[in-house]
Structure formats: C-alpha cells, structure tokens
Image (spheres, helix red, strand yellow):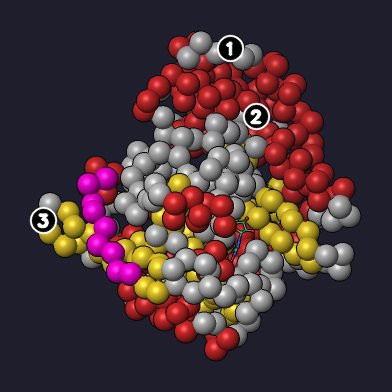
C-alpha cells in the first residue's frame, strides 16, 4: 500500500510543489495536511502550449491532474477568498475543478477576516521582534483552533450553528482587535460576509479522514503534500521563528486523521544549497557575492510574498536533524542547476558549538544562532545542467557533489531537479 509524504527538509521553498506534481502522476490521492495559503508552490507544466506557470497557495499541487482526487485535510486552515481565487484563475485557463476532484474536510478551520487583521496588528506591534509572518491570518487561525475558538467548514455550512459559534467567539476576538487598535467585528456582518462562501464551499465539503483512511486501506496510492519545511515546524523548528503548524511527516497523522502506519515513504525535499525567508537563525547564510549570486540565479524571491530569500550553502547538519525527525526514505535535491558557474561550492558538514563538534543541528533558536558551520569545499562546474536527464551526463564535479550530499545526510537520492519544468528532472528511484 504505497503512501508517500513529501516534506521540506530545510526552511521551506525547497521546490516541493514541483516534486509533488511529478509524483502525483503515479498516485490516486494528493492530500495537503497542514499550513494554509502561506505556502506558495510553483508548478511549471507544458500542457501543449509551451511551459505555463501555476502558483498554488492552497490547492494541492495535484490539481492539474484531472483524474486525481485532491484533498485539503483538517490540518489545513482555509481562506475561502484565496481558495475561490485559485479556482477562478484555473477556470480562466480552461482548467475546471469538479467537486469530486477536490474534497475539503468538514473539520478544517476557516481563516476569518479578523484573523488577518490580528496577524497584521500583532506584527506591526512587535517592532524588532517580528517573526516575519506572511500576514495572512494563518497563525491566529491556528491559535483559535487550539484555543477552541475556531470556526470550521462544518460551522459555515449550517447557518444556525455558525451564528452560535460566532456569538461565542466574537466578544473575545473583539477584545484582541481593540487591544491591537483594529476595527471590531459584528456577528451579523461576519455571517452575511460568509454566506456566499459557504454556498460555494458546500459541494466540496467531505469527511476527508474517512475518505483518505479508506483509500489507504483499499491500497490506493496516496501522496501527502507538506508545506513549509521541517526547520519551521511549530514543535521542532527554530521556535519562535517557525510557522504555526506541524510540518514534519508526523503532521500527516494529526492533520489528516490517519494512523502512523499509513505512512510508508517519506521524501525529503532539499535545495542543493539553502534558503530561508523571514527572521530566525540560519548558520550557512551568505552575505557576500556568492549569496547574491545564489539569489539571482536561483530567483530566490518568495512565491507568496515576493520577499527576497536569504541564501546560503547546503547545511548537512540541518538536513540530518530533519532526517532524524522524518526518517527520510529518499531525498529530492532541487535546483542543482543554480550551482553551475561557481568556482567552488561549500557544504556545511557539521557545526562548532561551545567548543564541541555538532553533527546534527540543535534547532533551538539560540543554540543555532551560535552554531558555527564547519565547511568542506568542493570544486564547482561551469556547464549548464538544465538539459541533462541522466546522471552519467552530469559533469564529474556535480556527480561528486551529489554523492557527497547523500553521504553526509545518510539518505539515498530519489530525484534530482535541474530546472523548474516538470521535464527537467532525473528520477533515480520511484517512491511509488
Ligand atoms: P515550494 O514551496 O517548496 O513548492 O517551493 P517554491 O515553489 O516556492 O520554490 C521553488 C521555486 O523554484 C519555484 O519557482 C520553482 O519553479 C523553482 N524550481 C523548482 N525546482 C527547480 C530546479 O530544479 N531548478 C530551478 N532553477 N528552479 C526550480
């Protein structure tokens, strides 16, 4: 019963969207299990009219495959406006999404208008202590989930239930809005605002834990699509510089409602170098010309926010930490093409911390901030890799670099990506 989780092995933006889209061809269900529209998965697919770029924030990356079932599980928080905009944008390009193709869990939480307002208000009030959130209400929505103040898809679908829930939570939310100097909300206005969303959402709503659990038990191929990255996990990342959800493979179980044994393969996605968006420790960050070159060549600007990403060398100590949490069965190394042209390429093989050598990152933000990378230097290569489709055709230096990465991380490589296009990929081992 092949199931596979695709997880970011770094700080997000590793190119998960492309890998999920690639694997989606081989599977029946594609399931998003955490995060919200703070994800920005970019797919480049040629459907016969040349390469077309699709940026998805909320819809599972399998949505371009009409014969697959895409699932937004209960662990995902849903901004209805974003969801409908994405569906409309696809429709405008002739890509219709039937309800049978997109199932949204009845227990998924809704990002309310006040969540966005609270997010922006908090970030504005926090001065130098900013987390660097995307300001989309994701964190406040998760807070309300845990604080038992959330509004779920199933609440939206039943007007009387929605009114009861709003009456219970609005006074508390208004207290926070007041404190942040933001406009207060009313039950009536919110209910009126949400009514059209409820109507449009209804045909997609389903009990997805049964749907996915039954699919797994029936031997269907299920792909779980992670968002953000392991080092941003709310429990295991560089807290407090983290996202608000469980990004690791374990997040699948709580985010979907399937048992741990439903997870078979875990593919860790990592760039051939490293990037990070927003604040927080990043030991291999480069502030020199090499960093600027990685940013320019790798087009390292956020798909969701357009923010320039911080860039640095590959960090094996961080990926080993991610491996420890996820138990990767394979790695997908993306953006190897971006490294063409460097005379030398560095790899962080371990850290020095308080006079000790550390092989596996300590993700505590303060420890990681003080961790000093120990680098190994590898010869670079000049050749363009974007047209290479076989491992044997890589320059020897690129092959040696890949071999070193797999050795350092202790994980075999399933996929090497040499460009944004679906075709620019070497699949060395199929996870399904
Ligand atoms: P995700 O959030 O992990 O899906 O990552 P993003 O989609 O935000 O970032 C990956 C970016 O890199 C996108 O613009 C992709 O089109 C692009 N990309 C993915 N794989 C490759 C690759 O192998 N080479 C290059 N040059 N770009 C890639």
Sequence-wise, the earlier of marks 3 and 1 is 1
* Lateral position of residue 327 relative to residue 256, left or right: left
Mark whose residue sits in front, 3 or 1 = 3
For residue 67, say whether it is visible.
Answer: yes
Mark 2 residue crowding within 10 angstroms, few (<14) / some (14–19) / many (20+): some
Residue 63 quadrant: bottom right
Residue that carries the numbered disc 1 in the rendered image: 184
Q: Residue at x 17, y 54 (%)?
A: 353
Mark whose residue sits in front, 3 or 2 = 3
Report the disc number at residue 161. Answer: 2
Secondary structure category for the residue under label 2: helix
On the rendered image, what quadrant is the N terminus found in?
A: bottom right
Q: Residue at x 51, y 10 (%)?
A: 181
Along the line of sight, the residue nearer the viewer: 55 or 419: 419
Where residue 76 sits: x, y (%)?
57, 46
Q: Which residues are magenta?
A: 369-377
Q: Is residue 55 above or below residue 258?
A: above
Determine if the C-beta at disc 1 is less than 8 A from ligand 1: no
Report the disc number at residue 251. Answer: none
Q: Is residue 339 above or below residue 53?
A: below
* Lateral position of residue 10 relative to residue 316, left or right: right
Where residue 157 sits: x, y (%)?
71, 36
Determine the CA span between mark 3 and mark 2. 59 Å
Is there a contact, CB below 8 Å, between mark 2 and mark 1?
no
Residue that carries the numbered disc 3 in the rendered image: 355
- Dominant SS type (magenta): strand
Q: Is residue 372 above or below residue 339?
A: above
């Amino acid at each position: 019963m092949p199931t596979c989780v695709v997880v970011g092995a770094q700080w997000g933006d590793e190119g998960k969207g492309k890998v999920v889209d690639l694997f989606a061809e081989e599977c029946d269900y594609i399931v998003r299990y955490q995060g919200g529209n703070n994800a920005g998965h970019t797919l480049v697919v040629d459907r016969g009219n040349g390469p077309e770029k699709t940026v998805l924030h909320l819809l599972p990356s399998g949505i371009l495959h009409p014969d697959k079932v895409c699932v937004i599980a209960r662990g995902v928080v849903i901004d209805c406006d974003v969801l409908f905009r994405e569906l409309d944008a696809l429709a405008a390009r002739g890509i219709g999404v039937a309800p049978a193709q997109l199932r949204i869990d009845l227990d998924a939480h809704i990002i309310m208008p006040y969540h966005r307002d609270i997010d922006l208000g908090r970030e504005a009030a926090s001065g130098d202590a900013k987390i660097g959130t995307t300001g989309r209400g994701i964190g406040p929505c998760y807070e309300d989930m845990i604080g038992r103040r959330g509004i779920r898809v199933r609440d939206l679908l039943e007007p009387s239930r929605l009114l009861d829930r709003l009456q219970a939570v609005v006074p508390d939310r208004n207290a926070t809005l007041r404190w942040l100097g933001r406009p207060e909300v009313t039950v009536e206005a919110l209910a009126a605002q949400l009514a059209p969303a409820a109507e449009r959402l209804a045909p997609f709503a389903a009990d997805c834990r049964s749907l996915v659990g039954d699919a797994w038990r029936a031997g269907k191929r299920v792909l779980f699509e992670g968002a953000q990255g392991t080092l941003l996990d709310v429990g295991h990342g560089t807290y407090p510089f983290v996202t608000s959800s469980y990004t690791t493979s374990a997040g699948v179980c709580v985010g979907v409602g399937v048992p741990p044994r439903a997870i078979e393969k875990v593919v860790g996605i990592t760039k051939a170098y490293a990037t990070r968006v927003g604040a927080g420790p990043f030991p291999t960050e480069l502030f020199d010309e090499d960093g600027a070159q990685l940013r320019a060549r790798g087009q390292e600007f956020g798909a969701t926010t357009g923010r320039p990403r911080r860039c640095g060398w590959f960090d094996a100590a961080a990926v080993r930490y991610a491996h420890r949490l996820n138990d990767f069965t394979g790695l997908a190394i993306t953006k190897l093409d971006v490294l063409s042209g460097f005379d030398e390429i560095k790899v962080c093989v371990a850290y020095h911390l308080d006079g000790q050598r550390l092989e596996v990152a300590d993700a505590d933000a303060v420890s990681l901030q003080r961790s000093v990378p120990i680098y190994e230097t590898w010869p670079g290569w000049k050749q363009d890799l974007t047209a290479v489709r076989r491992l044997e055709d890589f320059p020897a230096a690129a092959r040696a670099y890949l071999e070193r990465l797999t050795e350092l991380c202790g994980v075999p490589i399933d996929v090497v990506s040499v460009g944004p296009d679906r075709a620019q990929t070497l699949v060395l081992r199929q996870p399904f």
